[in-house]
Image: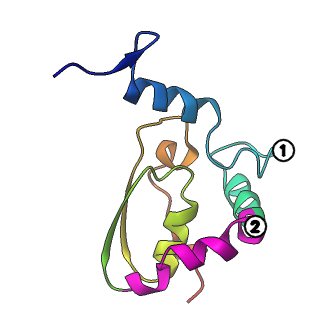
Amino acid sequence: MAVSTENGQSAKERARSVWGASPAGTTHAPNEAPGTRAFFERARERRANDELPFLRELVPFAKWKGKQVLELGCGAGFDAYEICAAGAEYTGIDLTPENPFARSPIWDFTDIIRP
């Protein structure tokens, strides 16, 4: 089976290029350095107002308490935060190394999640 290409790039390469050019959260925290705690908290604060109200209707974060959750395309870790805050056991994978969460696999949300 042939892999679909466009301009000589596979779908995976194109996805990596698009998401790598604009890592998750950069529009929400343009004055902060991606991968830093300040970046994450600022972008998460803005996202909480802009996106989370409707996202919580679509994604049952609270129903995942005590369950194992695998997120494909974890980006900056915003949904990872919500999943962990809900009490799930979380694993995230991202193919784009430019995303701050992917660059910072040692993130530990235990100090910023309040039970």
Could you say where residue 86 lies in the image, as x and y percent from the top left? 48, 82
Contact? badges 2 and 1 (CB < 8 Å): no
Question: Mark 1, residues whose alpha carbon is within 10 Å: few (<14), some, or many (≥20)?
Answer: few
Of pointers 2 and 1, the one earlier in the residue sequence: 1
Rendered position, 74 above or below 112: above
Could you say where residue 54 lies in the image, as x and y percent from the top left? 65, 73
**As drawn, is 62 to the left or to the right of 24?**
left
Q: CA distance from mark 2 to mark 1?
A: 14 Å
| Magenta span | 47-65
Magenta stretch: residue 56 in it? yes
Q: Secondary structure at mark 2?
A: helix
Residue located farthest toward the bottom when viewing the structure as drawn: 115
**As drawn, is 67 to the left or to the right of 103?**
left
Amino acid under disc 2: Glu
Q: Which residue is mark 1?
A: 31
Tell me which corner region of the image, top left, top right, bottom left or bottom right, holds residue 100: top right
Residue at image location 72% in from the left, 52% down from the top: 39
Residue located farthest toward the left when viewing the structure as drawn: 1
Query: Where is the N terminus found, in terms of image quarters?
Result: top left
Residue at image location 38% in from the left, 29% down from the top: 12
Frontmost of labels 2 and 1 is: 2
State the mark number for residue 99.
none
Magenta stretch: residue 44 in it? no
Q: Secondary structure at mark 1?
A: loop
Residue at image location 21% in from the left, 19% down from the top: 2
Amino acid under disc 1: Asn
Query: Where is the C terminus found, in terms of image quarters?
Result: bottom right
Q: Which residue is mark 2?
A: 45
